[in-house]
Image (cartoon, rainbow, N blue to C red):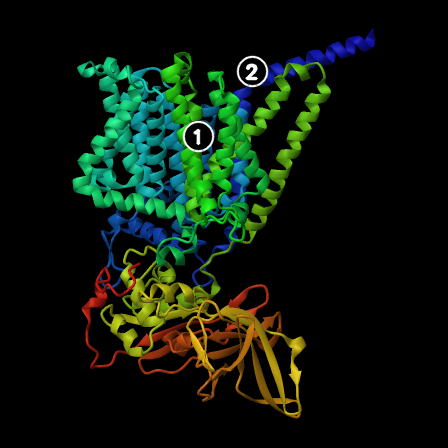
Amino acid sequence: MEHENKNTEIEKRKEEFIKKIKENKKAIGYVVLAIIIWFSYWLRTLNLKLLTDVTTGKYIPSELDSFVFLRYAKDILAHGSLFVHDMLRYAPLGFDTNQEANLLSYVVVYIYKFLHIFTSKVTLEYVDIIYPAVFFCISLIFFYLLIKRLFNSDAVALLSCAFLSVIPGYLYRTMTGFADKEALGLCLMFLTFYLFVLSYQEKKLNKSLIYSALAAIATFFMARGWGGTSFVFMIIGLFVLIEIFFSKFNEKDIFSYLLYVILLTLLLLVLLPGRYSLGVLFTSLTSAVMYLAFAVSILYYLVYYKNIFKLKEKVDKKMPVSVFCLIATFVAGALALLPFAGRAIFNELNGLYLTLTQPFGYNRWILTVAESHQPFFNPDWLSQMNMFFILLAIVGSIILFYNLVKPLEKNVKKLTFIYGLFVFAFIFSRYSSDSVLNGSNSISLWLYLGSLIVFIGILTYSYLKSFYKDHNIFLKIKELNKDYIFIFTWFIVMVIAARSAIRLLVVLIPIATMLTSYFVIYLINYFKNNERYKENNYYIWVALIVIAVVIFFIFVPFTRAVYNQAIHSGPAYNNQWQVAGGFIRNNTAPDAIFAHWWDYGYYVQGGFDRPTITDGGNYIYAWNHWMGRNVLTGHSEQEALDFLYPHNASYLLIISDEVGKYPAFSSIGADANYDRYSWIPTYSLDDKNIQETRNELVYPYTGGTMLDKDIIYNDVVLPKGIAGIAGFLVPIERDNKTLVNFKQPTAVVVYNSNRYDIPINCIFFNKKQYTFNNINGINGCLMIIPIITGQQMNMLGSALYLSPEVSQTLFTHLYLFGEESKNFELFYSDETSMPLAIYSGYGLLGPLKIWKINYPSDLKYNATYLDLELSDTSVMKV
């Protein structure tokens, strides 16, 4: 009896506890969200102490582009607004700052002013570098509210926020120091979607219009701060088109959407005229979808709800009114725009096709920018999210699709199966570069584009079939869940974006976390609510344990990875750059113009406080071409001076990164036939196979590279790109045990399974060049450099192969060989502390060198090099 009373008491307490949880569910949810936000901020600020400049003691950004927004924030703070013309960029012409999305700089200043009210110790630099962590935390609030609205589930929303806080691919761009646009832009995107969802969920027209107007304002601010507004245009536009197609768009929805587009358009045209015009908005593919949906909405309203010209009865006998409106609007729009903007529209469509189908890009510019490369599932997707997480997201989307079409009752499983095939084919069609699904062959393209076309075709056929043969199903389609349709639109657009460029993988992660969380919570609810398992708690607890294991295998590896990433994320503008920047600020005139490859423009402008010719904005591609062609791969100093003189360049900067970037700037600097395109491969000493003779040692260097130009040796043509150099043999004379002199080295060339030992006419070692005059030899050069491991240095440990093309460039003569020049006078070098070498654990590193440019008195001024575009059609146009 006593035992029964105890059990009864336990059950009573249990019920009371559960009751209290349910009564305070909302408060508990906010507490959990607060904990996630706190943890996210702590994680994202672990690297704070690493982000200081050793020469100034001030905080600095962790990556390249952030420097320009910090510099703009400083100007806004000093003058009240941003200067219209930025003379530190694109010297000597300057840059119109209206072309830049500069909202971020204003946001940083306003946060600084607010914090400065409470403490004078806070600095603008500090606010700038913590802004990404702060805005990630704010974005979690909007993300939580959005997901809660879409799924009507606190659990899905909280789990999604938790996942988002620890996913490696999302950490870097929202971590302290990465003060670029993404943290602000993604925050505004979540806010825009939240307000838009509120708008179509709201049943009262007045409130719906208010939410719609607020969504338009949020989108406008997003456009001011980030180019990712294109995603909002596309997702909202496609969602509206889908809703209209399935005859689900009511009058309230139409009015709200019309207000959204009209208000947004006015804001963009009036307040951002430097970046947006009607021509740009109507012909850009992403925004054109939004305006197509706008036009279709108007026609659909007139035909379906107002029955203008009694078209509804006439059309409804032959096809759904929505389909008629879509076809009519598309045809009318095409006929109206083609005479005026046909070429622009064709270019947009062609660019879309090329982006989707050409895995390595379609011009040299995309090929040389790593973030613009199309990613492979393995390793690119997997490095941002693990396989387990991705599979859960895909399965989550399949379950969600099943629940979307479940009200139709007929063909639910068939449609879900077809969707499952589509989503797997669509995502895995570009699996890896060495697999059958490499993204470029016909099988991959068919799975990618073909699966999308087939899936859309099946949905369209099923819809039209229901109209003609099963009106009951046709009516049920109108009742499909709007929220789920919005989620699928978001998901598909982001998968396409993430498949098109590595830098866009970050935009896929939020929707992936939603679908993964939905799957986990769906499973929990399935076991919890299924009648078969209610009678036996054993099955429920087994299910919960399985779900806990699933979460464990995501959270633990993600948290470990992001923690290690966070504590080691120092600035890319490292000590080497910082010391050089301090020297330049103290020893050069403030208006001294710097020439260098475009990657370092923001470093020089922000860290050195000096104007540059090129920078990461890349608004003038022609100057990148000439910098690559005339300067870095120039065959004479005259070529370089011809370009530098009109720009009034005072100094030339080169760093060891250029060795790895040689393919990039030589490609952009080459002509239409790639005349200067090459690369600098590394070879390693095979010290176990050194050959010893009486008077010499033969050092073998192993590696591999293809020839960059054809070579004819003993009447045999060794073609570029096919024949390759497998290694080098370097004989060195010795006196007793001391090495005294290099003898002519030999390149081991392999072609068609045949070996050709061809002499190399140059060796460069320890600041000395050894030349040979073998008429049958290759006029390239083998540059022998050290390998440094800790305190140990092997002076003969590695080698760089400089092909005949690379050997004759100004980059080689000035930077690699360190030759003296009257026109280029060495002004700064840290070679004594950072010699060019292979550093164990770091790779190839070397000095940062700066030359003062001295122009001959008879040098002619050539204004062509100030042109914004390349006029010579024989030159590659980037």
Q: Measured from the top left, where is residue 739 in percent x and y?
A: 60, 88
Q: Where, quadrant-wise, is the C terminus in this rendering?
A: bottom left
The residue mark sitting in front, 1 or 2, is 1
- Point 26% across, 24% down: residue: 325
Residue most extreme to the top? 1
Say few, some or many: other residues with alpha carbon within 10 Å of mark 1 (under 14 / 14 to 19 / 20 or more): many
N-term mark: 1 or 2: 2
SS type, badge 2 = helix
Identity, as a three-letter code, of the amino acid under mark 2: Glu
Left or right of residue 848, residue 728 in this image: right
> 187 above or below 832?
above
Q: Which mark is residue 736?
A: none
> 607 above or below 167?
below
Identity, as a three-letter code, of the amino acid under mark 1: Phe
- Point 59% across, 42% down: residue: 559
Left or right of residue 600, residue 78 in this image: left
Q: Which residue is mark 2?
A: 23
**Residue 784 seen from this side:** yes
Q: Nearer the viewer, residue 518 or 732?
A: 732
Q: Measured from the top left, where is residue 542 in percent x and y?
A: 70, 26
Q: Measured from the top left, where is residue 842 in percent x and y?
A: 55, 64
Q: Measured from the top left, where is residue 267 in percent x and y?
A: 24, 35
Q: Which residue is mark 1?
A: 488
- Separation of marks 1 and 2 at Cα, in angstroms: 33 Å
- Point 76% across, 12% down: residue: 7
Left or right of residue 508, residue 242 in this image: left
**Residue 158 seen from this side:** no
